[in-house]
C-alpha cells in the first residue's frame, strides 16, 4: 500500500546538479528498501542507488562519488542528490519500493544532461 511520486527531474548542463525526490503515501514506508533506477532509450533499466530500512546504501559504479541516496522516514520521502552530472546520466529515473514480494514503482521523472 505504498504509492510513489517522483519529482525534481529536468534539464541540466554537464557538471550540474539535481535532487530527485520520491514521496510515498500509504503505510509501511519505513519497512521498504528504497531504490532509484534509471532507463535510457535503447537500454535496460539499471539500479542507480538503493537504501535499506537499516540505512545501508549501494551505488552503481558509474555514479559512485557523484550521487547520494538518503531517506527521511518521518517525511516518507527518499532523495537522490546528483552532482557532477554527465550526458550519460540522461534517463528516466524511477523510484522503487521493495518489501518482500512487493515491488512498487513511481511514474518516473526525466533527467536530461546536455554537454
Image (spheres, rainbow, N blue to C red):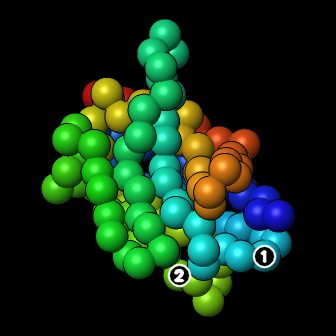
Q: Which residue is mark 1?
A: 27
Residue name at image x 41 percent, y 78 percent = 54
Mark 1 is surrounded, within 10 Å at the Cα level, by few (under 14), some (14 to 19) or many (20 or more) other residues, namely few
- How many numbered marks appear? 2
x, y (%) of residue 19?
46, 61
User: Residue 8's x, y, as percent?
Assistant: 57, 56
Apparent side of residue 38 relative to residue 105 in the rendered image (left or right): left
42 horizontally vs 98: left or right: left
Disc 2/disc 1 C-alpha distance (Å): 14 Å
* The one of 90 and 75 positioned closer to us in this rendering: 75
Q: Residues within 10 Å of mark 2 (few under 14, many from 20)?
A: few
> Farthest front residue?
100
Asked if disc 2 and disc 1 are in contact, CB closer than 8 Å, the reply is: no
Q: Secondary structure at mark 2?
A: strand
Q: Is residue 15 visible?
A: no
Q: Is residue 89 above or below residue 32?
A: above
Rendered image quadrant of residue 70? bottom left
- Figure check: 38 above or below 100: above
Which comes before the other along the chain, label 2 or label 1?
Answer: 1
- Indicate the quadrant containing the N terminus: top left, top right, bottom left or bottom right: bottom right
Circle nearer the viewer, 2 or 1: 1
Find disc 2 in the rendering and name its residue: 72
| Residue sitting nearer the eye, 8 or 103 | 103
Side (left or right) of 85 relative to 110? left
- The tag on residue 62 is none
Amino acid at each position: 500500500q505504498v504509492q510513489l511520486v517522483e519529482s525534481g527531474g529536468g534539464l541540466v548542463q554537464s557538471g550540474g546538479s539535481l535532487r530527485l525526490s520520491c514521496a510515498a503515501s500509504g503505510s509501511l514506508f519505513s519497512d521498504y528498501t528504497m531504490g532509484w533506477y534509471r532507463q535510457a532509450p535503447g537500454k535496460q533499466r539499471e539500479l542507480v542507488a538503493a537504501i535499506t530500512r537499516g540505512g545501508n546504501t549501494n551505488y552503481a559504479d558509474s555514479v559512485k562519488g557523484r550521487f547520494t541516496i538518503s531517506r527521511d522516514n518521518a517525511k516518507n520521502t527518499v532523495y537522490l542528490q546528483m552532482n557532477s552530472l554527465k550526458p550519460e546520466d540522461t534517463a528516466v529515473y524511477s523510484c522503487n519500493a521493495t518489501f518482500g514480494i512487493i515491488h512498487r514503482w513511481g511514474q518516473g521523472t526525466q533527467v536530461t544532461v546536455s554537454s
